[in-house]
Image (cartoon, rainbow, N blue to C red):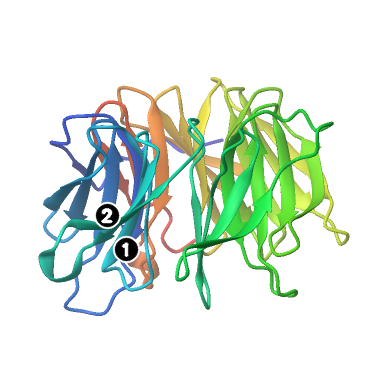
Amino acid sequence: MTLPSPDPKFDLRGIGAQVNCLHFSCNVPKPCQPLLFSGSSIGEIHVWNLSTRRAESVLNGHGGNSVFWIHTLPDRERLMSQGRDLQICTWNLAEGRKEVTESIPVGSVGFCNCSLLNTERSLLAMPGIESSQVYVMDMESKKIISSMTPTADCRWGMAMCMKLWQPNSGSSPLLFVGYEDGSIALWNVLEHRLMSSHIFHKEPVMSLDFDCENARGVSGSSENILNVWRLDEQQYLKTYKEHEIVNPGIADVKIRQDRKILATAGWDYRVRIFGWKKVKPLAVLQYHSATVHSVSFSDHTIPEERLLAAGSKDQRISLWSIYPQT
């Protein structure tokens, strides 16, 4: 049985629009303050100081168009954001600045979020010109290093969500893409090669995340099914476990960095917490009064400081301290 819903540790208000996406930047040396970035439906990005619980600044570079993906580059002085204006913006935040230094045009008119991988070099997975096509760009040279397009017999429809990651063995990054027909595909980036695919959902894949240490992933759609899947030794996608939730609609899924907790954002206004090892339901967080669009775990190094953030259509962000010692 799940536990009764606790109260949030605190919430953030005053956004004036629905919250679409969230991103933490807390793993920084003092005196730097832990930050939370939120993107809204009116094109604004709020930079929240988690110590004062106030917005330090508001960025506006997408011409009033909805922002649905944000991520910091390794130095935290640069931020990337993706909007419905078909632009990916890079922001300079050094020394209090808030200026767009460059914009990358996106050919796709869908809602497919980008995915950023920070290793020896920063790589950006982004939707391509064709609806099912995806690109990977080297952020230093701004060159497309890979273009991945399904063959004509793969009627997957639009790319809906992505996860770029680096396996422990092998030189090439790998990319998961969730598609409109409910398929998830695994691509070898440097070889531009489809490694495997599987239909996990009857509806478009709305969100996915992957635990590369345990070779297990999770995805959600407009259905009432949370699907957990795995990669076998031959890198084939296989069903691992399905969990039925009460109400349909999973907008976002996130695995905590320590790979112990999974959170989902629900169309039914709820955030659900699972133990990741066995996908065991632990709690249902009931606070918001509208669809929860995004969930994100903080990257604090100290477990007691870890937070879960949830952003909602009700224009609020809730912050929770969830099983920090688990």
- Residue 250 on image: x %, y %: 53, 30
Tag 2, which secondary structure? strand
Q: Relative to 82, is 40 on the left or the right?
A: left
Q: Residue furthest right?
A: 234
Residue 278 in sight here: no
Residue at 31% x, 59% y is 79
Q: Which mark is residue 89?
A: none
Cα–Cα gap, marks 2 and 1: 6 Å
Task: Find disc 2 in the rendering and name its residue.
Answer: 36
Name the one closer to the observer, 192 or 80: 192
- Residue 106 on image: x %, y %: 46, 42
In the rendered structure, which amino acid carries the disc numbered 1? Ser
In the rendered structure, which amino acid carries the disc numbered 2? Leu
Residue at 86% x, 62% y is 233
Q: Which mark is residue 25?
A: 1
Residue 297 in sight here: yes
The answer to which of marks 2 and 1 sits earlier in the sequence is: 1
Question: Image height check: is 280 above or below 326?
Answer: above
Q: Relative to 148, is 45 on the left or the right?
A: left
Tag 1, which secondary structure? strand
Question: Image height check: is 312 above or below 95?
Answer: above
The answer to whether mark 2 and mark 1 are in CB contact below 8 A is: yes
Residue at 29% x, 32% y is 65
Query: Label 2 neighbourhood size at 10 Å, few (<14), some (14-19), many (20+)?
Result: many
Name the one closer to the observer, 108 or 27: 108
